[in-house]
Image (cartoon, rainbow, N blue to C red):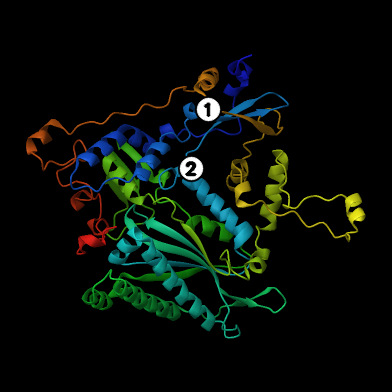
Amino acid sequence: MSLACEVSGSLRELAAYRPRRPQDTALHRVLSAHLETYLERRRGDPEAEPLPDHVEQTLRSYLRCGIPAFGVARARCSACGLDVLVPFSCKKRGVCPSCEARHRVETAAHLVDHVIPRVPVRHWVLSLPKRVRYFCKHRPVAASAVLRIFLRAVQTELRRCCPDAPGSARFGAVGFEHRAGAFLNDNYHWHVEVTDGVFADDGCGGAEFFEAHDLSPERVLRIEAAIRRRVIRWLVRHGMLEQHSADEMLSWEHRGGFSLDASTRIEAWDRHGLERLSRYCARPALSLQRLHLIDDRTLLYRFQRPDPQGRTEMLLTPLQLIDRLVALIPPPYRNRVRYFGVLGPAARLRKSVVATAGPSAALQAQLEHAAQQMGLDAPDNGEPEISEAAREAEGAPETPEPPPRRPSLAAYCWAMLLARIYEVLPLLCPRCGQPMKIIAFVTERESLRPLLECVGQDADPPPLSPARGPPQPWLELGPGAPCIGEEDPPSLRFGVTDQTLGLVDEQDTDQSAGLPDDHVA
């Protein structure tokens, strides 16, 4: 019997889990219609920088994400025979809203369950001037140096706020790299979750926590001033800034573009609030809910709050949106989440510090109930089981069984993440309420096409529009003609803006203004 005939006709019935349809979203429609045009025109623009290979691969992979024609996972209920097809994801960074949302939720769950102990945590945000952002974005060594300077200043001040702590006490921190602001602008900055206190060895193989007191706004301003001086001094020492430019930056008003905020504090008992904060720190740059397609040539992106110019929304052409997304895609093999202090992987006190990590009791009970309903096996503790007879034969002393450990990051499956966030049980049969099992991964076209046709889904992927040339009137403008959109004004080249249209803030596009060419990475 063929695979298509094995699939029950009940697939067409209402199911508890409905796979998403990315081809119906504004972002997918824009990329499928204009990606080839953007790539072709960028290659033909002598003033545009070459597009890195990983950027093009990320954009093309997004067009395959969630499309059943490229492969599905088949889940079946053994009790009633109901089948559900789940498309594959692209697992790329920077563009795909679905994969970025999973990374966000998975990272937050890992931090709460395994990393951050039950102590107060403070949210620190460091914003940088535009010239420093450029170096941090294009030179990883500069980004790492700025982050180390920032965290060293914070740890020093936390020790001062803990007079009873020894001089060797250390804090714990988790840093999140952000390459964009809330307005889809090029704004490199850091979000860091820092324990509001320091840890020290208690002399018995454990760790003792000293909570920080009197972390006033004046202390935060002192930390900010120290970061400003040390960062500029580091840039001068490594040849990225001239001394006269450094003196000018130190004389700027409004703290020279450096901004440090530490107003949010999560108490030790609020594990749910800590997870929400972690999701906020790991959020992607683009929000699909705020992107709207007005027509074939205009998109509207709404802001959560007014920007510095007072605007609450922004108009973009399709190629301008792609141009912004290209600038926000992180390079490969560059960690976006980093661990410091006692939370670092090689820290001596890490095992004692993270021992108290874990979700709230209510969430733990909810997850155990969801796993039981969907028939998922409880994770083991990673140790081999030894029978009582073997223990007696070896003369080993009887020891109490250790409690089962929470699942590691690799064990966070798709079904449990949906149950954790949306309280949806995707592997629970909607017909009989019995658990479902994934029985196959179908990728061959010979088997995939009849399977999708049997359930009434498109067996062919959405078509990609070929590259289109510039409009005919532009061809009479000579070699200096623009090459962005079909009806874009001549000023809208790659990285060039027209503020009268309310499209892009030109102050946030060129981070290398006034710098020699040899500084460009």
User: Does residue 468 appear in this view?
Assistant: yes
Quadrant containing the C terminus in the rendered view: bottom left
In the displayed structure image, the side of residue 335 where residue 493 appears, left or right: left
Q: Position of residue 341 (x, y in %)?
A: 54, 70
In the displayed structure image, the side of residue 287 where residue 488 appears, left or right: left
SS under mark 1: loop
Separation of marks 2 and 1 at Cα, in angstroms: 17 Å
Q: Amino acid at mark 1?
A: Thr
Q: Are marks 2 and 1 in contact (CB under 8 Å)?
A: no
For disc 2, the marked residue is: 91
**Residue at (28%, 71%) from the top-left corner?**
239
In-front residue for pair 135/296: 135
**Residue at (43%, 72%) from the top-left corner?**
150
For disc 1, the marked residue is: 443
In the displayed structure image, the side of residue 70 where residue 237 appears, left or right: left
Total marks in image: 2
> Hey, which residue is sitting farthest front in the picture?
394
Q: Which mark is residue 474?
A: none
Q: Amino acid at mark 2?
A: Lys
Question: Counting other residues with Cα less than 10 Å from the Cα at mark 1, is it few (<14), some (14-19), or many (20 or more)?
Answer: some
- Write down the quadrant of residue 210 in the picture: bottom right
In-front residue for pair 5/205: 205
SS under mark 2: loop
Q: Position of residue 422 (x, y in %)?
A: 58, 44
Quadrant containing the N terminus in the rendered view: top right
In the displayed structure image, the side of residue 189 where residue 374 appears, left or right: right
User: Does residue 271 appear in this view?
Assistant: no
In the rendered view, tell whether residue 213 sits above or below residue 55: below
Lower position in the chain sequence, tag 2 or tag 1: 2
Q: Position of residue 284 (x, y in %)?
A: 43, 51
- Write down the quadrant of residue 186 in the picture: bottom left
